[in-house]
Amino acid sequence: MFRSRGSGFKPGVREPWWSAANESGVMEVYNHGADHDHPDINDGNGDGKPDGIPAFNPYFWDQNLGIYVAIGAGPGGGSGTANFARIDDYREADAEIRRSAAYIASRIAPAWPDLFAYPYGQFSSYLAQTYFPQRQSEHRTVAAFRTGTGSFAGNYLKRTTNRWKIPRFTHGAAAPNGWSDSAGLIAILNR
């Protein structure tokens, strides 16, 4: 999603490139969650409105989606623990995943962001074993990516890899889960 810290930010101002990028053949826009379950963006009282939004990060009502959208986070809300693995119910999973996908899709239509990368690489058994496989007709996601497993061999895709827990190498993570320089990336690519 996008982040703005300046005053006078208008919704959508920084999003026009999403559609062009998605159609470019060079890159595509996918789903990474509504707000990373960030501690500054939460809905602790369950009213559907983010609580505790800092002054530099306001929210607005999105008429099309029928939800509040945090500028800099997109739609969502949660308890704001920065722990995506704690999401264990439909309401929060739906806000973080399906509603975020709908928001992105409204900017890249007719495409749909059908891949999901877990924020921080964290996932709960509810997300990987219940929400993603059993609610696919709702969220329309076809695969979800976690961070590395702790071994080079375990981080590569295999036919037996669970499509709701596909390992990904992450820039900035220590080997074997990622790389921080070109030599580290080359080591991953050459294995």
Image: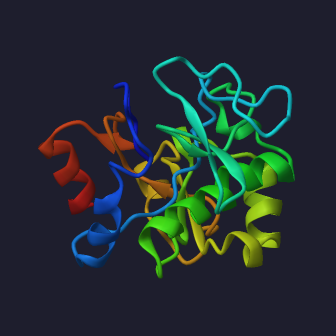
Eyeballing the image, is 184 above or below 37? Answer: below
Horizontal and vertical percent for residue 90?
Answer: 85, 53
Identified at 34% across, 63% down, the residue is 18
Residue 124 relative to residue 166: left or right: right
Residue 155 relative to residue 24: left or right: right
Instruction: Tell me how many marks there are.
Output: 0
Horizontal and vertical percent for residue 11?
Answer: 45, 46
Identify the image quadrant of the C terminus.
Answer: bottom left
Eyeballing the image, is 104 above or below 67? Answer: below
Query: Camera-side residue: 99 or 97?
Result: 99
Query: Camera-side residue: 83 or 60?
Result: 60
Q: Quadrant of residue 182?
A: top left
Identified at 54% across, 29% down, the residue is 58
Residue 142 relative to residue 10: left or right: right
Eyeballing the image, is 59 above or below 100? Answer: above
Eyeballing the image, is 112 above or below 56? Answer: below
Identified at 45% across, 66% down, the residue is 107
Horizontal and vertical percent for residue 35?
Answer: 57, 39
| Residue that extends furthest to the left in the rendered view of this protein | 182
Scheme of colours in the image? rainbow
Horizontal and vertical percent for residue 161?
Answer: 59, 68
Identified at 85% across, 27% down, the residue is 45
Query: Camera-side residue: 140 or 13?
Result: 13
Residue 137 relative to residue 118: left or right: right
